[in-house]
Structures are given as structure tokens and as C-alpha cells.
Amino acid sequence: MIEARHLRVLRAVATSGSFSAAARELGCTQPAVSQQMKALETNVGTPLLVRTGREMRLTEAGEALVRHAGGILAGLTAAEEEVAAIAGLRSGRVRLVSFPSGSSTLVPTALAALRAAHPGTRVSLEEAEPPRSVELLREGDCDVALAFRYEGAAGEGAADSAEWADLVVRPLLTDRLVGLVPERHPLARAGSVGIAELADEPWIAGCPRCRGQLVQVCAGAGFTPRIDFATDDYPAVVGLVGAGLGVAVLPQLAVESVRPRGARTVELEPTVRREIVALTLPDLAQVPAVSATLDELVRAGAR
């Protein structure tokens, strides 16, 4: 194996013409230069220098190695500088995956702060709902995943306590679910609404995980919701409710990201909350750009 330090010594000897001159150039002793040259020749398995009296010249192998040494050492220097830039957050890349309501609320605030503090760090954004977002993280297709799980949830679409056991979990906020009814609905101005009061209404359901949670909450209230429409698009949910086509349950974060024309939010009983988190792998958490992104997401969740 050829070591970079040996190449630097060889190049110094070739350009200076002697061990003593190379030692002065490198700031070391002549015996140290001699030892490193012997080690290099042992590693490559052939002489690199011919010593005749006070003169020293390169063998054919030595000339070939010196010819390549410049490019090799330049490449190593460039690599060292690039790694140092990443470590110092002068550059870096983070692949972020988020669910839609997180993309429209938490992510813009976090990325704006990250760009202001570290303009050399680039972040790409892709949207996916959990559990797909978590799968992308584990498969190596992203560096940070925003995800959520419902408090005390069980059954289909729910996350148990071991779901993220192998990941670094940064809590961002607790998001309360609210009811959404047409503005002319009899319960539109109620202070709070028991979900059982909506048992006979047509329902508009959201993403698969949210849909599973809705069915579970309704079952706890003694009924099965009649789901007329299902869509992952929160503005579409709001639009359908606003048009009087049904009622829905949405996370507060989702309502904040759209303008609920023709619809009103009501507090829901029993209270249902979901935990919003940022996830990454343990090794990735040590990468400065990833760590800085997580920190900004935590700050955005606290606002």
C-alpha cells in the first residue's frame, strides 16, 4: 500500500535532489526521510532511487510514481478541504422527506433559518407519509424524515413504542386533531363537539394512517364512519367539507396550512393528539449538516 506521506517525501526528494534538502523542506531529519523512502520502496517492491556518490536520480519506477504523485496529492488535498468544509458547515447536502402538512408549516421555517445560518448547506425535499417516509430513511434514500404517530394509538395505522427504536428521534411538537364541518352545519359554532354527535354524517378521510386513526376513534365512540371520500390532499379535504359534502377530522397543523373556506373547525372530544418528530439514523446524526437541520426543525416546532 502506498501512503500519502511517503509520496510527499518522494516528491520532495525528487524536486530537491537530496535527502538532506528534502528534510529541510519537510521540516524533519535526514534519517527520517531515508526511513520513509526505504518503507516506500519496500511497499512498491522495487527501487525508486539510485544513489551514485553524491548524486541521486530516480529509477524508471520512481519517475512514474513522481509523475502520478502530483495528481494523487492534489486530489487528497481537495478531498481534505471538501470534508473540512462539510464538517464546518460551509457546504453539505441533506435529503429531507416530510408529510404534506409538515412541508407547508415546519419545513419552510426550519430551512429558511438553516440557509441564513449555513448558506453553503443544500437541502432537497420530497414528500411521503409515514410509514413510507421512515422506510425511505432506513433504505438510505433520505437523511432526515418527518413523521408522526398518534398518542396511545393501537391497531391498523398506529405506531407502537418500538417502531422507531433503531432511529434517533427528535420530538418537534404535539399536534391536536380538530373537527371540520361546513360553516352552515348546526355544530359549526359549538365550543366542542363529541365525535359521536357526527356519527350520522358523511365523512371525508385523509391519509391511510389518519384514516385508520379516524376509524379507531369512531369505534371507541360506538359507530363506524361512513367514508364517502378519501384523499391525501388536505386542501381537497377542506374543499369537500366547505362544499357541504361531509365532515372531517384533521390535524391542527394541516388546518394551519390551508385556508378553510366554507368550513369551520371545532374542538373534538375525546381529545386526540399526534406526536410530530424528526427522525434520522444514528450515524447520520453525527453529520454536521444533518445535525443542524434537526436543530432547526426542533426550533420551528417550538414556535
Image (tube, rainbow, N blue to C red):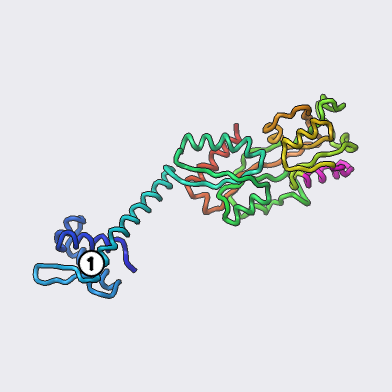
Dividing the picture into quadrants, the one containing residue 262 is top right
Q: Is residue 157 magenta?
A: no
Question: What percent of the width, then of the height, locates residue 50?
Answer: 16, 72
Q: Is residue 233 left or right of residue 220?
A: left
Q: Is residue 214 magenta?
A: yes
Q: Is residue 18 left or right of residue 191?
A: left
Report how many numbered discs are placed on residues in the image.
Answer: 1
Residue name at image x 82 percent, y 26 percent: 188
Q: Is residue 61 left or right of residue 234?
A: left
Residue name at image x 75 percent, y 27 percent: 261
Q: Name the residue beneath numbered marker 1.
A: 63
Question: What percent of the width, then of the height, locates residue 231?
Answer: 76, 42
Dividing the picture into quadrants, the one containing residue 177 is top right
Residue name at image x 23 percent, y 61 percent: 11
Label 1: few (<14), some (14–19) or many (≥20) C-alpha neighbours in 10 Å: some
Between 168 and 296, which is closer to the camera in this rendering?
A: 296
- Res 176 visible: no
Residue name at image x 87 percent, y 35 percent: 198
Question: Residue extending furthest bottom?
Answer: 45
Question: What percent of the width, then of the height, locates residue 49?
Answer: 19, 70
Residue 20 vs 225, above or below: the answer is below
Question: What percent of the width, then of the height, locates residue 110?
Answer: 56, 37
Between 170 and 80, which is closer to the camera in this rendering?
A: 80
Say what amino acid the circle numbered 1 marks: Glu
Magenta range is 211-227
